[in-house]
Each structure stands twice: as structure tokens, then as C-alpha cells.
Amino acid sequence: MFNNLIDIERLTTDEINQIIALAADFKTGKAKSAVKEKVLCLMFCENSTRTKCSFELAAKKLGMHVLNFEAKTSSFNKGESMKDTLENLYFIGADAVVIRHSTPFIVDEALNAINYPLTLINGGDGNNAHPTQALLDYFTMLEKIKMVEGKKVLIVGDISHSRVAKSNVALLNKFNADIHLCAPIYFKPKNVEKYNITWHSDIKTAIKGADIIMALRVQKERHINEQYQLEDYIENYQINSKLLKLAKDNVLLMHPGPVNRNIEITSELLDSEKGKTILEQAQNGVFVRMAVLNLLLSKKGARCF
Ligand code: CP
């Protein structure tokens, strides 16, 4: 079983199934915590609502202690390195740290740098990976449509900046979904075809017969040199009720959040019954993160100093 959660690629399908099954048991109240009194540190160096709050609530529901590391007032600002910070947090008493950071691969690098058995969980690193988001998305899909094998999953939007898209593609490929990606040229990643997906630039073609549509946030904070017009995106890629009619009748509409209302999805659609799945994704994040924490930390022995 995994000791850290860095990305989806390193999980086996058995491990993912185990997380999903345990999350379901936490949701129905069948599972019990095996990690009471363990200590989780939340190191969020980039903004977050869903990931941070649901990890905190997950830890509290499991009877864990939570350390809220404040990056802005931390000794990072005195020049302390990530390695030294994590090793000090371990000696203070943290069993695990969730890291959210704007730098891709920083969690991987931290794992290689530290000399102590602190568990690291990637809470989203730049445009690289967001494994717990993909797990909660998969959990929500299974709740609604039972299985993804052979199902047409369309991911649409700012794919080149999206860690959510990468982690979802990695996970959905493990379970043989029929993955379609759609974006304008300015949001098309380099070498995207290597990911075993079907690429589209035309949303009307892409959306036909879709079982699941996952819209992505336009990530303005990561658009350093890109030239694009938001009006062009809205006119050609925004999900609205008319476009949704081209998908399957019971199509599942998803979005990792936060949503830019009236940019990726119309406000009217968000507030309709179809838009409710997006809130259920956030809710399921608590149970999936409870499962991840329980599996990662329950097998660790007593700390020895
Ligand atoms: N989906 C997601 O990661 O949301 P937050 O940035 O609010 O955590």
C-alpha cells in the first residue's frame, strides 16, 4: 500500500478501489477511524477552499489533530527551505502534511529531500497533479453512473494549466474510460495526444453523446504569456443548456471548482438540478480524504523519539 500520495500514476487500480470503498463506508457511517490522535498539518501556500476545508474536516471527523501552517507568516519568509520546514514539522509532531503549492513537482522533490518518515500528500502542485481531486471526481462518477469503462468522458476548458485534467486522465485511463479533451488552441497542451485521449477543438462535435462533462476553471493566475480573449472562450466553449442537449439525456455535469460563473458554465445551469453534482463533488471530498488519511496513517507504528 502507498505511504504517500504524490500523484495518481503511482497508485494501482487495487489501491484506488480500496480508497473508493473506504470512502463509501465513511459516507454511510460503516467505517471507523484508525488514526485517532494522529497529527495532520495543512500547508497551503496557494489559495484553496474545498481541498483545505475538506482535509481539515476529514481529519477532525477521524479524531486527528490539525495544525494549520500559515505560509504567509511562516519562517519560509526568513528563508527556511521546504526540507527544513517539513523535518521540523515532523519533530514538532506532524504525522502527515498536505502540501498545496504553485510549483509543479514540489511535493515529489520534498519527499526525496526529507530524512524522516513524514507522510506527504499532494493537495495540488502547480499544473502537475491533484490526486485527491481525481479520486473524489471518480467517487462521484461511480455514485452516479456505477462504472466509467467505455463511458464517454469529456474534459473541456483550460487544459494546459490544469492539474485536475492531468490527474483525471491518469485515473480514467486506468479504468478504461473513453476520454475526450476539448479546448481552444490557446489552452491546448503540447504533446497532449500521448495521453491516450481523443482531442477536439470543436465543442459541438466533442459533446455529442457524452456521459460525463467536466468543465475546468479558466486559471487566470497561471496565464503569464498567453494571448487569448475571454469573450472567444465564452462564445465557443461555455457549457450552456442548449449545448448540453447534444450530450446524453442523463449527462453528468462536473467541475472541480471554484467555478467562474458565466465563463465555464452559465449561472442558470449551475443553479439548476444539473449543477448540483458540482456541490456533491465538494461534499464527497470529505469522505475520500478521510479514506486517504485513514489508509495512509493507520499502518504507521508509534512515533519514536
Ligand atoms: N478543486 C479545488 O482544488 O478547489 P480549491 O482550490 O478550492 O481547493
Image (cartoon, rainbow, N blue to C red):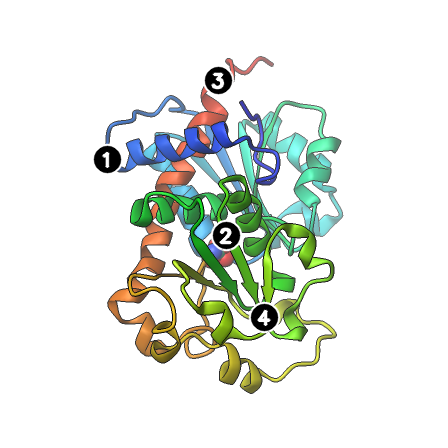
The reply to whether the residue tagged 1 has its Cβ within 8 angstroms of ligand 1 is no
Mark 1 belongs to which amino acid?
A: Thr
Q: Residues within 10 Å of mark 4 (few under 14, many from 20)?
A: many
Mark 2 belongs to which amino acid?
A: Asp
What residue would you read off at disc 1? 28
The reply to whether the residue tagged 4 has its Cβ within 8 angstroms of ligand 1 is no
Q: Position of residue 55 (x, y in %)?
A: 43, 43
User: Residue 299's mark?
Assistant: 3
The first of marks 4 and 3 along the sequence is: 4
Q: Is residue 281 above or below residue 58?
A: below
Q: Is 283 left or right of 182, judged from the image as shown?
A: left
**Label pair 2/1, CB-CB below 8 angstroms:** no
Q: Position of residue 255 (x, y in %)?
A: 43, 61
Mark 4 belongs to which amino acid?
A: Ala
The image shows a total of numbered marks equal to: 4
Which quarter of the figure is the C terminus placed in? Answer: top right
Q: Position of residue 80 (x, y in %)?
A: 73, 43
- Between the C-alphas of marks 3 and 1, the distance is 23 Å
The answer to whether residue 48 of the structure is visible from this angle is no
The answer to whether residue 170 of the structure is visible from this angle is yes
Which tag is nearer the camera, tag 3 or tag 1? 1
- Between the C-alphas of marks 2 and 1, the distance is 30 Å
What residue would you read off at disc 4? 183
- Between the C-alphas of marks 4 and 3, the distance is 42 Å
The first of marks 2 and 1 along the sequence is: 1
The first of marks 2 and 3 along the sequence is: 2
Foreground of the two, 127 or 49 = 127
Mark 3 belongs to which amino acid?
A: Lys
The first of marks 4 and 1 along the sequence is: 1
What residue would you read off at disc 2? 178
